[in-house]
Every structure is written in C-alpha cells, then in structure tokens.
Image (cartoon, rainbow, N blue to C red):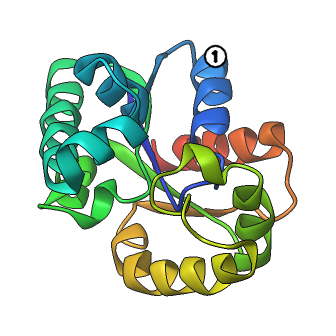
Amino acid sequence: MKISLVGYMGSGKSVVGKALATKLNLEFFDLDQQIQDSAGMTIPELFKQYGEIKFRKLERELLLQTLESRIGFVLALGGGTPVYYDNMKQVNTHSTSFYLRSNLKFLAERLEKEKSKRPLIAHLKDEELPEFIAKHLFERRNFYEQAHHTVDIGSKSVDEITQEIIHLLNLQK
C-alpha cells in the first residue's frame, strides 16, 4: 500500500504521516527530509545557495524515486510538490493520495510560529502571512483537490485524522 499526503505547509502532513505509518505498519518518508538528506543541507540553505529551480528538480527526482522504487509507504509531500511538473499525476498513478485540507486561520496561526524554518515565508511580517497563504491556497487548491480523497483536518486530533484516512482506505477495497 502506497499512501501520499498533500496539503499546504503546516497542515500536518509529516505528523499525520508518521502516525498513519505506525498504525499501518508501513515505512514513513518525508519528501522534504529526503531532499535535505540528499543535498546535505537544509531546505532554506538549498534555496539560498541554488534557488528554487534546483530545489524543484531534486524534489521531482526524489519523488519519482520513492513512488516507483518502494513497495509500501506513507509519504508526506512538500506543500508545493503537487504544483510542479506532472507531480500530482505521478502521485495519483503510484499511490492513494489524501489532501489534508485546512482553513486559513489555522494555517496562519501555526505557520507564524514556524516562519524561520520555511524559506517561502521567512521574510514575511506576521500581518502579511494570512494574505500570502490565501493567495497560495488559491493558486494550489486545484492541484491539491486532484487527490483521491480530501480530509478536512479542522480541529481534529492526529488520531482522528489517521482514523478517517484508514476508514477511507477500507472503503476503497
């Protein structure tokens, strides 16, 4: 079983992915972590030194490698991964995908605390964050909504979200 989690940064893909992988006895992969391990530097360092284009190429390479070479896993994609190349098509071809949908207020509150770790928003003032996220969500929603399933995360716990995903997987069989 191959499961991919998509959604905006801060939507909980990594936390939910780890919990889901544990419950389903599958390997967990975080695409951002794979990129950092492969590049030997953090994503902010990679962006600063090589720019977004090199980052997206490496992201694509590692995404395809994971999707095609692994038998069973839960994969947390980066927030922008579905938007580039035909990544979302590849994700849907090689795995069952879930869009972890969240509202603007939740994302803004969560990302305000994590700005320094996120190169796309590190330069923004706190009051600029909601508008930036809203614009990005508008641009990316079409890609996210191509996922096989959508899970509204709202104020649900990680356990509630993983149970909902497992329920959707069982309905699919």
Q: Please give left or right for residue 164 compared with residue 97 in the image.
A: right
Task: Report x, y in % for residue 153.
Answer: 73, 60
Q: Does residue 85 appear in this view?
A: yes
Task: Report x, y in % for residue 103.
Answer: 71, 75
Residue carrying label 1: 22
Q: Please give left or right for residue 75 compared with residue 47 in the image.
A: right
Residue 43 occupies which quadrant of the picture?
A: top left
Which quarter shows the N terminus?
top left
Q: Please give left or right for residue 33 compared with residue 167 in the image.
A: left
123 or 2: nearer the viewer: 123
59 or 82: nearer the viewer: 59
Please give the count of numbered marks on the rendered protein: 1
147 or 84: nearer the viewer: 84
79 or 55: nearer the viewer: 55
- Residue drawn at x 33%, y 17% is 37
Residue 24 occupies which quadrant of the picture?
A: top right
Which quarter shows the C terminus?
top left
Type of amino acid under label 1? Thr
Q: Please give left or right for residue 127 compared with residue 32 in the image.
A: right
